[in-house]
Image: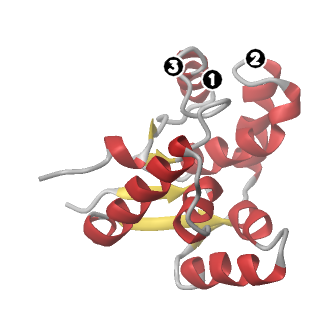
Amino acid sequence: MSYCVYIETSIISYLTARPSNDIRSSARQNSTLEWWANYSSAFNLFVSEYVLAEAAGGNSDAAAKRLNVINSLPILEVTNKVRELSQSLLHEGALPEKAEIDSLHIAVAAAHGMDYLLTWNCKHIANAIMRPKIENACVLSGCEPPIICTPDELMQE
């Protein structure tokens, strides 16, 4: 059985960015490149219109690289259930109001039954303090929460 993975924008950004001199960013880039090259083919990968919109922003050359990587990935539909779950995540305090786009990423993944949400956004998404609140809001909305993780956590032998 092949698991379904929602690819959040930070993954695409680290995958296509110029090599960084910052040790943390460099480590994330290396992990992302390794995961994409060696592990991604074991999964069914998906994005949303929010990933496309974020990937298209900024420097046009960098945006073109990001969009090229995801142009063949299926795009999950933004449904009423997605919008409602996003609002629940914000109103229930699982995420701060300023993190609306992050709530939408989580909502798309949960509403579409993704097994994993892959991200480097550790401020609002892959955050151990917020994760139980996120999972609770998903369950209360009738959705199974995806396992939120980084590429380092989604490698299998």
Query: Residue sitting at 49 percent across and 34 percent down?
Result: 145
Query: Residue sitting at 71 percent across and 84 percent down?
Result: 64
Q: In the image, what residue type sits under mark 3? A: Ala
Query: Residue sitting at 61 percent across and 34 percent down?
Result: 125
Res. 113 visible in picture: no
Alpha carbons under labels 3 and 2: distance apart: 17 Å
Identify the secondary structure beneath mark 1. Answer: helix
Label 3 crowd bin: few (<14), some (14–19), many (20+), radius 10 Å? few
Query: Residue sitting at 88 percent across and 32 percent down?
Result: 98
Mark linked to residue 23: none
Q: Which residue is mark 2?
A: 92
Res. 99 visible in picture: yes
| Pointers 2 and 1 in contact (C-beta within 8 Å) | yes
Q: In the image, what residue type sits under mark 2? A: Glu
Residue 17 in the image, given as x and y percentages of width and height: 61, 67
Residue 113 in the image, given as x and y percentages of width and height: 47, 49
